[in-house]
Amino acid sequence: MKKVIFALLVAFATTSAFAEKAETKTNSKAEAVVLSLSGNIIDEVSGEALVGVEVKVDGSDQKTYTDFDGHFIIDNVKSGECKLVTSYTSYNKNEKTFQIDSKSNLVKIELQASK
């Protein structure tokens, strides 16, 4: 029993050491850091969540759609400046640029109804 516990502790320590080393390498190069970007899209006037809004990262093929709560998530976004383009039927197309980093990756976008 002691051998099993010892083996598990050694395996855990080894895994932790390698994980910490890999994280240090990734964070040492700013352009190599990729994050998840998430946010909510609401109507500018009513504040209601908008369902099915297309959200694209400008200059890439990454896109997604908002869920029933107006929430979206885009994975594998490089840190730094990110331009999101949103489009939705009966609303004006919206383009906004955000500064994305490990601390700030939650955005809120308000769409204006077209006239």
Image: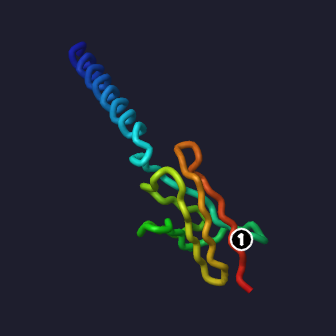
Viewer-proximal residue among 25 and 91: 25
Rendered-image quadrant of the N terminus: top left
Q: Residues within 10 Å of mark 1 (few under 14, many from 20)?
A: some
Q: Is residue 14 above or below residue 71?
A: above
Residue 22 at what x, y percent from top left? 33, 35
Total numbered circles: 1
The residue depicted at 59 percent of the width and 67 percent of the height is 68
User: In the image as oriented, which residue stretches furthest toward the bottom?
Assistant: 115
Vertical order, 6 against 25 (above or below): above
Q: Position of residue 85 (x, y in %)?
A: 56, 70
Res 61 → quadrant: bottom left
For disc 1, the marked residue is 43
Q: Position of residue 100 (x, y in %)?
A: 55, 51
Identified at 30% across, 30% down, the residue is: 18
Task: Residue 88: name its quadrant.
Answer: bottom right
Q: Assign the C terminus to one quadrant of the image.
A: bottom right
Judge left or right: residue 94 versus residue 13: right
| Element type at mark 1 | strand
Residue in the picture at 60% in, 72% down: 51
Task: Please say which color scheme the image uses.
Answer: rainbow
Q: Residue furthest left?
A: 3
In the image, residue 13 lies at what x, y percent? Answer: 31, 22
The amino acid pointed to by label 1 is Asp
